Amino acid sequence: MADPTTGHDEGELAAIARHALHDEELVAAFAAGDLEDAIEQERARALVERCATCRDIHRDLAVIRTAIRASGTAAERAATMSAPRDFRLTADDAARLRPGSPIARVARRLGWRARLDLGVAAFGRPVGAAMATFGVVGLLIGSLTLGGGPGSLFSAQSAAGPTSAPGAEGSGPATSTIDGTNFGPAASGQDTKNPVPVSGGRDTGTQGVATVALLGGSIAFLVLGIALFVAARRRAPTVAQH
Amino acid sequence: MEDLRATTVTDDPVQRRDLILLDRAREGDLDAFNDLVVVYQDMLFALVVRMVPDRDQAADAVQEAFFSAYRNMEGFRGGSVRSWLSRIAINAAMDAQRLKKRRPADPYPELEDDTWQPPADASADPVTSSLTAERHHALNGALAQITNDQRTAIVLYDVEGYDYAEIAELTAVSVGTVKSRIHRGRLALRGLLADRMDLFRG
C-alpha cells in the first residue's frame, strides 16, 4: 500500500529505512577500491549486492569519478585557457621580495644556504644526537658535583663546618668567606682578622666556577643538539625527494 | 668545489630549460624568472581555479605563488621545477581557501570556469559535444559547492593525479583523512548532482 505523503509503497519505505543504517562512506571506499581489510570489503560487497540504493551509489560514484577525470588536468586546460593577468614580476617586486646587501647577494650566489641545508640534512642527526648526549652527561655530572655526591661542592663546604654562623665567631670551628675565599676555623685565641686559609678552600671556589661552567655548557649543548637534530629531520625528507 | 646548487642533470629538455632559468634567476636574473612565469602561469592558474572557484581570488593566489617562489628560490633542491611551482601554487590556493573560510558571508559563485571546455572528439556529433559541455558545467557547479578540503583532495587526486601520500603531505593531514575527504566529497557531489545523474550515466 502506498504512503499518501511520499507516494512510496511499504516495500520501498522498508528499503529506505534499511538503507538509512548502511555506511555510505564504506560503499564509496569500496567503489574507489580503497578497502584493504577483507572483512570490510565483504561488508561493502554485501551492501552493494543486497541494497538497491547502495548499488546506485556504487555505480554513480564510478561515473562521477570518470567524469571528473575527463575534465582535464591543469596542463591540458592551460593549452586552451589563459590566465586572466600577467603574473610577471616587476623590478620593484623583485627588490621587495629578495632584499639584501651586496654581501647577501654574493652569499646567495655562492649558494651558502643550499650548502648549509645539505650539511644539516647529512650530518645534523648524528651530530645533534651526540651533542644532546654530551649535554645530558654534562648535566648529570654537574648536578652530582653541585648537589651533594662524594666530593661535591656542598659536601666539601659542609665538611669544612658552618659558614660564618652568627655568634660563632671565635667560639669554635667556623669558616668565613672573604672575597670568595673560604677560610677555615680560626685558631684558638687568634683574631679573626687574620684568618688562616684552609688547605683546599681556593680549590673549592674554583670547583664551583667549573661546575657552573659545566652546567651552562651542558645546557647549551643539549639545546643546540636537539635543535640540530630537529632541523635535520625536517630537511632530510625534502633533500631525499630530490 | 662543486656547486651544491647544481641540480640533477636531466635528459628532458623542458626540465633542463627550467633548471637553467631557475639557476639564472637565483643569480639575480629577473628576466629568467619571468620566463618561467610566462611558461607556467596558465597551467598554475588552471590548477588553482579548480581549487578556488573564483577567478579573481585564484589569480591572486597564483600571483602569491610566484612571489613565494621568487622569495624561496634557494629552497629548491633539484627535481622538477614544474612540480615545485605546482606545490607552491597548491599551498597558495589553500591559503586563499582559508582566507575565504573566514569570510563565509561571501560564498563562491558557481565555478566561473566556462572559458574552458573539455576538448571534443573531432568525430563527435553536436549532441555529444553539447552533452559534454553540459556535464562539465554541472560538475563544476557541484564542485564549487562541496567543502574546500573535499574539493582540494578530489582535484589533486582525480584530476591532477597526485597519490594519497602526496596529497597528505601537501595538505598536512593523514592518508586516511585524505581518503575520507575524497569519499565524502564524491558522495556530496552525487547528492548535488542527484537530479542530473542521467547526464553522466548516459
Image: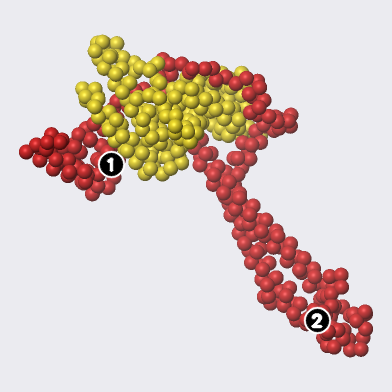
- In the rendering, what colour is chain B? yellow
Amino acid bearing label 2: Ala
Q: Is residue B135 left or right of residue B83?
A: left
Numbered tag placed on residue A150 in the rendering: none
Question: The N terminus of chain B appears in which quarter of the rendering?
Answer: top right
Q: Within the image, what quadrant is residue A157 found in?
A: bottom right
Q: Tell me the CA gap for discs 1 and 2.
A: 79 Å
Which one is in front, A235 or A9? Answer: A9
Q: Left or right: A152 with respect to A125?
A: right
Tell me if residue A45 comes above or below residue B40 in the rendering: below
* Residue B20 position within the rendered picture, expressed as x and y whole percent measured from the top left: 57, 23
User: Could you say which quadrant of the image residue B21 lies in?
Assistant: top right
Amino acid at the residue labelled 1: Glu
Label 2 neighbour load within 10 Å: few <14, some 14-19, many 20+: few
Above or below — where is A197 with respect to A123? below
Left or right of residue A109: residue B94: left
Q: Earlier in the sequence, mark 1 or mark 2?
A: 1
**Residue assigned mark 1:** A25
Q: Which color scheme did the rendering employ for the protein?
A: by chain
How many other residues sit within 10 Å of disc 1, few (<14), some (14-19) or many (≥20)? some
Examine the image and state in which quarter residue B112 appears. Answer: top left
In this orientation, which residue lies closer to the viewer: B105 or B133? B105
* Chain coloured red here: A
Front position in the image: A150 or B201: B201
